[in-house]
């Protein structure tokens, strides 16, 4: 072979290498992207979140990272001091609003007793001696006491609410004897293991119900409340123990009365009731009926029974905003509306009956982002509304054990937190920490950019975040990836507080994408009409908002609207498949993880709450498998085959429909995984990156990249 051919061969190899470099991403590209995940960014943040470890009612210590070291401080609220100390080490946590012992036990307020479930019945345990005393005797399978195993819940813990005097518990006997069963089968060598449990579906004749009881634990006696069994429903969400204890219960201090709220199957009717804990007699106080679905707050239940003054604090959206009302508990009549205006109460923090003052978190009262929460106080009479957190941003507040002080951490998605302590009248006590991200910025990190656009109606403001590559090429446009969680009980953004890493949004951006996260209409934390925009049609999935938002953002950012991808998990998986089937000319690549594609195959409460009862809503028209034939782009479906939240049949219905329609698609299954993928989550993330890199970016990913994880 002569020199000429050697030269030609060498040039060909160089050309091939250059071409390969331009058509693929390397392992180093993925390593850099991975460095933007939480375990890559967290180590560079100093003076971050303050986790108070309370020593007494007004004194606590906390530790904070400072460079390579750690500093521990002792804070005395009364003396208004913050002192560097070496006496304490970083451990422990804040106070909880209920007490749970081991093995699902619930500890009494005085700490001397606990309640637990054994053989479908309730027992009380003397903690000092360990002696067990049986409280109920008629509990049987599928009709047990204090159980929390309906639908997607499988807890063995007892669901009870202790009376303040530690002498009684309010609980229930849960009847699911006629509820339909759900089945899952394990994957293993040898005979598979069958998982079977009660999992009612929308439209089922029988769902789980609760027979309410009060139990005297000192002289064991069961008192049945003289009302029919209630549906297994709560005012806050689809489970009667969403807050970790028996929800919608409020005891009188002496244990003689218990107030509670009964929720109808479709969440449209709420009955406020007060029971005599000694006789079981129930008095109907008032009821509220809504056209769509009632909720008692965002993330917490906001009603309170005030027996001393014979009053009730009640939460309602009757004037289109979530507000507090004062009721007379004897007459059931409204005495006055406490809060009023175009803002929403999210969390009632404290009720001071002596000064007749309420303390609460509300969104949207201040100018700017309506999702930022601020802390306020107001009189029972609706007068003297005062903001206790004047700084711009989203405020996360926790009270001291004495409830005379509060710790306030405020931030924005692009502004790190400042944490301080104030007295309950809003006066500054001590500055605690100002989060320092200078070391993080030095690595090349940058915060996402908050954005505001118009919803699909052209008038409503909607909000979101945009993640762009830290190193952008001014001469090119970038494919866009839409991360979606449509709610309707939550949204894509989640917390509007600062977070250095929000999932893998920035990591994906580093691979060559622009990532958008848009909070669409029909999500909570704003007006009732905003939240109800897609009531009865969850298949809308905020997608018209997502599309119009991306088009608007493309006018300002270098977004290639011909290369739009979308992905999400659970409700986001449902939305992703809907996007690919109903808007196939806009969304080109989608990854649908663990989606509830047909809400007739998801637990009863979810659909019946946000769509209404089956007889009143067209569930068939919302089912994704009916539109699978419209697929044009690249779609990956993902599910865990032991998913006890969203059963895998939801995805398999879509798989079958795609096969019937002769459509090509990709499928990733996790044989023994539940709704989340556990140890396989890094694998799924890598597959997600690969799929978008190959099909949306048009490049080859590094083969079988192994996520390094937090130990790197």
Image: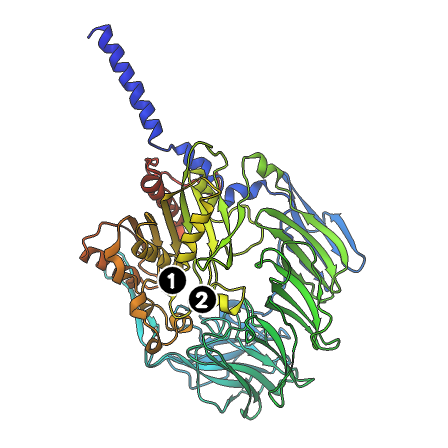
Indicate whether 447 appears above or below 592: above
Which mark is first along the chain, 1 or 2? 2
Query: Which quadrant, please, contains the N terminus?
Result: top left
- Furthest residue in direction front, as rendered: 458
Tell me which residue sits at (32%, 54%) in the image: 583
How packed mark 2 is, by other alpha carbons closer than 10 Å (few <14, some 14-19, many 20 or more), is: some
Q: 422 or 109, which lies in front?
A: 422
The count of marks equals 2
- Can residue 149 be seen in the rendering of this structure? yes
**In the picture provided, is 400 more to the left or to the right than 41?**
right
Label number found at residue 540? 1
Q: Position of residue 577 (x, y in %)?
A: 32, 56
Q: Are the two marked residues, 2 and 1, in contact with CB atoms closer than 8 angstroms?
A: yes
Pointer 2: what residue? 533
Q: 649 or 277, which lies in front?
A: 649
Q: Position of residue 354 (x, y in %)?
A: 74, 77
Q: Position of residue 511 (x, y in %)?
A: 42, 38
């Amino acid at each position: 072979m002569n020199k000429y051919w050697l030269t030609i061969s060498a040039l060909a190899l160089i050309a091939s290498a250059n071409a390969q470099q331009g058509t693929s991403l390397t392992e180093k590209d993925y390593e850099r992207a991975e460095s933007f995940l939480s375990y890559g960014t967290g180590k560079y943040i100093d003076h971050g979140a303050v986790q108070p470890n309370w020593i007494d009612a007004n004194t606590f210590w906390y530790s904070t990272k400072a460079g390579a070291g750690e500093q521990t401080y002792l804070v005395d609220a009364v003396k208004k001091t913050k002192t560097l100390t070496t006496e304490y080490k970083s451990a422990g946590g804040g106070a909880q609003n209920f007490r749970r012992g081991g093995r699902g036990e619930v500890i009494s307020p005085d700490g001397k007793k606990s309640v637990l479930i054994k053989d479908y019945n309730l027992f009380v345990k003397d903690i000092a001696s360990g002696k067990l005393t049986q409280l109920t005797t008629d509990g049987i399978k599928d009709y047990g006491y204090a159980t929390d195993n309906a639908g997607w819940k499988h807890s063995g813990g007892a669901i009870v609410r202790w009376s303040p005097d530690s002498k009684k518990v309010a609980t229930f006997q849960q009847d699911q004897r006629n509820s339909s069963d759900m089945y899952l089968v394990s994957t293993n060598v040898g005979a598979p293991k069958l998982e079977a449990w009660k999992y009612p579906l929308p439209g089922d004749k029988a769902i789980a119900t609760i027979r309410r009881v009060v139990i005297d634990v000192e002289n064991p006696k069961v008192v049945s409340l003289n009302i029919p069994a209630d549906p297994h429903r709560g005012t806050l969400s689809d489970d009667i123990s969403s807050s970790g204890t028996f929800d919608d219960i409020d005891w009188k201090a002496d244990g003689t009365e218990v107030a509670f709220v009964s929720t109808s199957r479709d969440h449209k009717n709420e009955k406020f009731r007060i029971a005599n804990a000694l006789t079981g007699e129930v008095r109907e106080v008032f009821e509220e009926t809504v056209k769509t679905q009632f909720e008692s707050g965002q993330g917490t239940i906001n009603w309170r029974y005030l027996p001393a003054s014979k009053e009730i604090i009640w939460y309602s959206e009757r004037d289109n905003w979530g507000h507090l009302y004062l009721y007379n508990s004897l007459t059931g009549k409204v005495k006055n509306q406490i809060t009023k205006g175009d803002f929403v109460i999210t969390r009632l923090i404290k009720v001071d009956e002596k000064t007749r003052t309420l303390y609460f978190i509300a969104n949207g009262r201040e100018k700017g982002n309506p999702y930022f929460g601020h802390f306020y106080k107001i009189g029972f009479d609706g007068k003297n509304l005062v903001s206790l957190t004047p700084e711009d941003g989203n405020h996360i507040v926790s009270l001291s054990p004495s409830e005379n002080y509060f710790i306030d951490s405020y931030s924005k998605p692009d502004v790190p937190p400042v944490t301080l302590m104030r007295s309950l009248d809003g006066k500054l006590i001590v500055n605690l920490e100002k989060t320092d991200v200078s070391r993080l910025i030095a690595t090349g990190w940058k915060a996402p950019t908050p954005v505001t656009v118009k919803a699909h109606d052209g008038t409503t403001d909607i909000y979101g975040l945009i993640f762009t590559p830290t190193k952008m090429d001014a001469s090119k446009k970038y494919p866009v990836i839409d991360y979606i969680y449509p709610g309707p009980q939550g949204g894509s953004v989640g917390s509007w507080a600062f977070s250095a890493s929000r999932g893998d949004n920035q990591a994906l951006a580093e691979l060559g994408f622009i990532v958008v996260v848009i909070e669409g209409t029909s999500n909570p934390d704003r007006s009732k009409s905003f939240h109800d925009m897609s009531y009865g049609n969850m298949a809308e999935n905020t997608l018209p908002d997502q599309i119009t938002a991306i088009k608007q953002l493309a006018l300002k950012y270098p977004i290639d609207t011909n290369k739009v991808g979308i992905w999400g998990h659970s409700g986001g998986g449902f939305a992703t498949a809907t996007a690919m089937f109903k808007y196939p000319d806009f969304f080109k690549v989608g990854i649908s993880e663990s989606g509830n594609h047909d809400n007739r195959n998801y637990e009863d409460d979810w659909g019946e709450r946000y769509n209404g009862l089956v007889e009143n809503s067209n569930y068939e028209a919302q089912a994704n498998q009916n539109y699978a034939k419209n697929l044009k782009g690249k779609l990956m479906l993902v599910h865990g085959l032991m998913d006890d939240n969203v059963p895998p049949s939801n995805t398999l219905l879509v798989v079958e429909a795609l096969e019937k329609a002769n459509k090509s698609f990709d499928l990733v299954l996790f044989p023994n995984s539940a709704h989340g993928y556990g140890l396989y989550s890094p694998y799924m993330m890598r597959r997600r990156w690969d799929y978008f890199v190959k099909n949306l970016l048009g490049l080859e990913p590094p083969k079988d990249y192994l996520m390094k994880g937090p130990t790197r």
